[in-house]
Amino acid sequence: MDLPVMPPVKPMLAKAVAKIPPGMLYEGKWDGFRAIIHRDGPETVIGSRSGKPLTRYFPELVRELEDQLPKRCVVDGEIILVSADRLDFDALTERIHPAASRVRLLSERTPASFVAFDLLALGDRSLLAEPQRERRAALEQMLVGIAPPLYLAPATLDQELAQRWFSQYEGAGLDGVVAKPLDAPYGADQRVMFKIKHERTADCVVAGYREHKSGPVVGSLLLGLHDADGRLQHVGVCASFPMRRREELVEELAPLRTDATDGHPWADWADESAQARSRMPGATSRWTGSKDLSWVPLRPERVCEVAYDHMQGDRFRHTTQFRRWRPDREPDSCTYAQLDEPVRYDLADILRPANPA
């Protein structure tokens, strides 16, 4: 491979802001795997955000990329997986599997799509130093006539339309809006863009914690919500505490460690059959490999309020942020019923095929 922009490339990033800023290029914030495609004739590499290749996991995309993209180009975008009328991140994570036979099966059973939103190189020309507006124009011209499962990300200069997208797109599984400065060059591994995400709050049961990688202090609180049958389901974690607060939490939660395993709703987390029935905090992760996922059980008697952006299925999609303890709430009252349900929005109305050449 001999391209003007060679792999690996760390993608341009975004910093969080509270409101959609004016005077920029706006796109939906896709919920998938960030991917930079390098194609040089018969060679195609799909690079991840960390720089590790994803090529072997998506053979069906490699075929489409080689059929539809120019012979020499570098494209930034997102690998997504569509179920019914919305994005399905859980199904997408299943595509990362060590067995080649499983990869082939899933490529047929749950094929992925690719949404392109930036162009880093075309032919022998690097576009990294070109402003966003020119890279977008070149990308649009390059992808005229592109067909599913490859898509050009919808974009607009209209701030009011971007605000409508912010409200509507969540119903299709997207998690906000991205704003890109029109005159900015491509800043690899730099937070040049802006992301605007939804924030809501929920009251959750604290049923355990994981220790921090630095030592015996709290790394993250393990959160639970009761389902319709009254079972406490593991829905995510709350983290990002200052170190002093991590130390304080160990002492604060110490009384709840006494007899915590007696009748704990997640006591069977080590049982593989139980893992198949529901998400347990000790589940093996294909992303962390041998990383220690052990946890400290607590009697599920305390409730905290957390901020979250959106749900993926029956759990929080991202790490939540601690807001406050809720001594006025009973753990049994912490159910899924309190959560907002976005108005459904058909993903097909977003992922429209490009106009034919």
Image (cartoon, grey):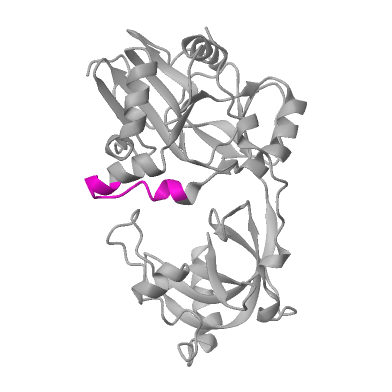
Quick check: 342 left or right of 295? right
Can residue 41 be seen here?
A: yes
Residue furthest right as drawn: 160
Numbered label tally: 0
- Is 162 one of the magenta-colored residues? no
Q: Which residues are magenta?
A: 91-102
Front residue of this view, candidates 346 and 16: 346
Location of the N terminus (image quadrant): top left
Find residue 306 and report its horizontal and vertical position in percent.
64, 63
Find residue 203 and report its horizontal and vertical position in percent.
68, 69
Q: Residue at x 58, y 16 (%)?
A: 183
Find residue 70 and report its horizontal and vertical position in percent.
37, 12
Q: Residue at x 68, y 64 (%)?
A: 202
Can residue 280 be seen here?
A: no
Q: Residue at x 65, y 73 (%)?
A: 228
Residue 339 falls in which quadrant of the image? bottom right
Residue 67 falls in which quadrant of the image? top left
From this view, report whether residue 181 is shown above or below residue 46. Answer: above
From this view, report whether residue 153 is shown above or below residue 283. Answer: above
Quick check: 205 left or right of 62? right
Find residue 160 and report its horizontal and vertical position in percent.
77, 27
From this view, report whether residue 305 is shown above or below residue 319. Answer: below
Front residue of this view, candidates 300 and 213: 300
Q: Residue at x 57, y 71 (%)?
A: 224
- Is 93 one of the magenta-colored residues? yes
